[in-house]
Image: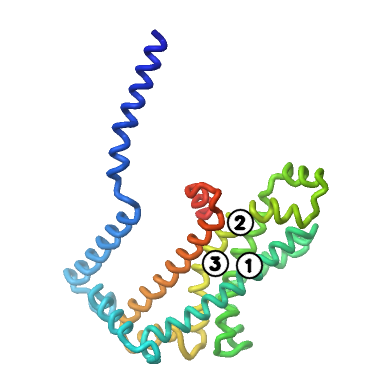
Amino acid sequence: MSEMTTMSSGAGGMTEDMTARPKAGRAIPPRIQSLILLVAFIVLWEGGVRIFQVPRWLIPPVSDIAVALWRGLATSPFAHDGFWYHSFITMTETVLGYLVGCGLGFALAVAISQTENLEAVLRPFIVAFQSLPKVAVAPIIVLWLGFGLASKVAIVALLTFFPVLITGLAGFQAVEPERIELLRSLSASRWHIFTKVKFWTALPFIFAGLEMAAAFAVVGAIVGEFVGAQSGLGVLILQLDSAMDVGGSFAVFVILSLIGIALSAIIRALQNKVLYWQPKQQTQRTINL
C-alpha cells in the first residue's frame, strides 16, 4: 500500500513535471524580455516627451537622438567631427588603461599572495589609495602627464587597478587550507601550490574584478577627456553641450553604453571559455557578487 502510495506520489510528481515542462518551454528568454523592456522604455520616452511637450533642449525625443546618432555615424571615420574618430580615441585610451590597470592589480595580488606578511604591510596604503576620489586626482595626473594619451591611460589604469587587486586577494584567500596542507604533505613547491590550486580557485573572483573594471575603464577615459584633451567622446560631449545639441550628447551616451556592453560581453565570453568546468549559473553568481 505504501509502495502504491509512493508510486502514486511519484506518478503525481511526474505529472507535475510533465505539466511544468511545457510552461518552462513557453517562457520568454531573458534576452527577449530585455528587448521588450527596451522597446517599452523607448515608446514611453518618445510618447512622454511629445505628449507633455518637454522642450527638446531639456530632454530630446528618442527620434532626435536616433537622427543625431545616424548623422554622427554617417561621417567619414577620418573626419575629426564624426563619431568614429572620437570613438576610436576613447576606445584606445580605455583598452590601454584597462590592460595596464588590470595587469598591475593582478601582479600585485599575486605578489601579496606569495609573500607572507606583505598584505599586512601594504594594507594601510591600499586602503588609503582606494579611499582617494579618483575623479579629484584626474586633474593632477593631466598636469603631470599632459593632455595626450598617457594621462588618459593613467587615469583609466588607476580606476581599474583596485577592483582586480581586491577581488584577486579575496580569491587567493578563498583557498581551503586543507588543500594547501595536502599539497605541502606531498612536498609541493610554492609555485606548484599557486599554479595548481590558488590560481584556479581565484579565477572566478578575478573575472568578477575584470568585469567591474571594464565599467570603470569607460568612466575613467571620459573623466580624463573632460579634464583636458583634444579629442575623444568626452571632448565631443563638451562641444555638443556648448552648442546646446542635447540630442547629439545623448547619441554619444548611447555609443559609450555600447562600448561598455561590448567590453562586458568580451569578459563574459572569455570567462565562459576559461571557467568551462564551472556551471554557468554558479559562475554568474560569483561574477555578480
Give the residue drawn at x 78%, y 63%: 121
Residue type at the position of mark 1: Gln
Is 45 located above or below residue 148 in the figure? above
Residue type at the position of mark 3: Ala
Q: Which residue is mark 3?
A: 213
Q: Residues within 10 Å of mark 2 (few under 14, many from 20)?
A: some
Q: Position of residue 270 (x, y in %)?
A: 52, 61
Q: Nearer the viewer, mark 3 or mark 2?
A: 2
Label located before the other in sequence (2 or 1): 1
Task: Left or right? Give the position of 84 relative to 41.
Answer: right
In depth, the one of 198 and 240 nearer the eye is: 198
Residue type at the position of mark 2: Leu
Whether the residues at callouts 2 and 1 have beta carbons within 8 Å, the answer is no
Q: Which residue is mark 2?
A: 203
Per the image, label 3 sits on a secondary structure element best described as helix
Q: Which mark is residue 130?
A: 1
Give the residue drawn at x 38%, y 75%: 255
Residue 194: image quadrant is bottom right
In depth, the one of 34 and 139 nearer the eye is: 34
Name the residue furthest top: 1
Q: Residues within 10 Å of mark 1 (few under 14, many from 20)?
A: some
Q: Position of residue 125 (x, y in %)?
A: 71, 67
